[in-house]
């Protein structure tokens, strides 16, 4: 492989990595339609399923568990809460604000299955919701 081909390959790979990083950034900071009292951002979510349960993990660093509302509906899980802006105090300037604050809401589509119970806990800044599936007998 010539120098020209290896340089082109290197730049193609670097561009692909940058594109992926931008997609991940947009996904994490996806802004919803802003309106008074409405959600203004959506947290990232992972959903896993096995034969016994559906496991939903929602990244919520800085959000207290008792302030999170979890609603299970037909075919979806709805997570709502608010990440409050830390008190900057009088006379303090904000130099960088990258972490989203304010009300958030995330409606998560679930796999088609019957759910018989649920449990939730906050682990390392992530809300983990376990949805227990009804066993087929």
Image (tube, helix red, strand yellow):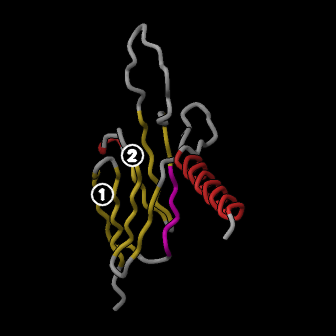
| Extreme-bottom residue of the structure | 137
**Nearest to the observer: residue 23 or residue 35:** 23
Residue at 65% across, 63% down: 6
Q: Would you identify the image quadrant in which residue 115 lies? A: bottom left
Describe the element under mark 1 as helix, strand or loop: strand
Which mark is on residue 9? none
Q: Residue at x 55, y 52 (%)?
A: 24
Q: Position of residue 17 (x, y in %)?
A: 58, 56
Residue denoted by label 2: 60
Residue 35 location, x and y as percent?
A: 61, 33
In the rendered view of the protein, which quadrant contains the N terminus? bottom right
- Up/down of 109 relative to 84, above or below: below
> What percent of the width, then of the height, locates residue 19?
63, 53
Where 9 falls versus 90 (above or below)? below
Badge 2 crowding class, 10 Å Cα cut-off, few under 14, some 14 to 19, many 20 or more, is many
Report the residue that reaches farthest toward the top: 91
Q: Which residue is mark 1?
A: 120
Picture coordinates of residue 110, whole percent (x, y): 49, 68
- Mark 1–mark 2 Cα distance, whole angstroms, equals 13 Å
Magenta stretch prevailing secondary structure: strand
Asked where in the image residue 116 lies, by quadrant, the reply is bottom left
Residue pictured at 49% horizontal, 42% vertical: 104
In-image side of 131 versus 11 (left or right): left
93, above or below 8, in the image: above
Quarter that holds the C terminus: bottom left
Residue stretch rendered in magenta on the structure: 106-111
Say if the magenta span includes residue 109: yes
The residue depicted at 35 percent of the width and 53 percent of the height is 127
């Amino acid at each position: 492989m010539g120098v020209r081909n290896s340089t082109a390959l290197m730049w193609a790979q670097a561009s692909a990595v940058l594109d992926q990083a931008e997609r991940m950034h947009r996904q994490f900071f996806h802004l919803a339609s802003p309106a008074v009292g409405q959600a203004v951002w959506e947290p990232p979510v992972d959903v896993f399923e096995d034969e016994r349960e559906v496991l939903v993990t929602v990244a919520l660093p800085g959000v207290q568990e008792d302030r999170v509302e979890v609603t299970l509906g037909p075919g979806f899980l709805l997570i709502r809460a608010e990440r409050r802006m830390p008190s900057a105090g009088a006379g303090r300037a904000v130099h960088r604000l990258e972490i989203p604050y304010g009300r958030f809401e995330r409606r998560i589509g679930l796999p088609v299955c019957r759910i018989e119970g649920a449990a939730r806990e906050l682990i390392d800044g992530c809300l983990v919701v376990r949805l227990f599936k009804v066993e087929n007998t």
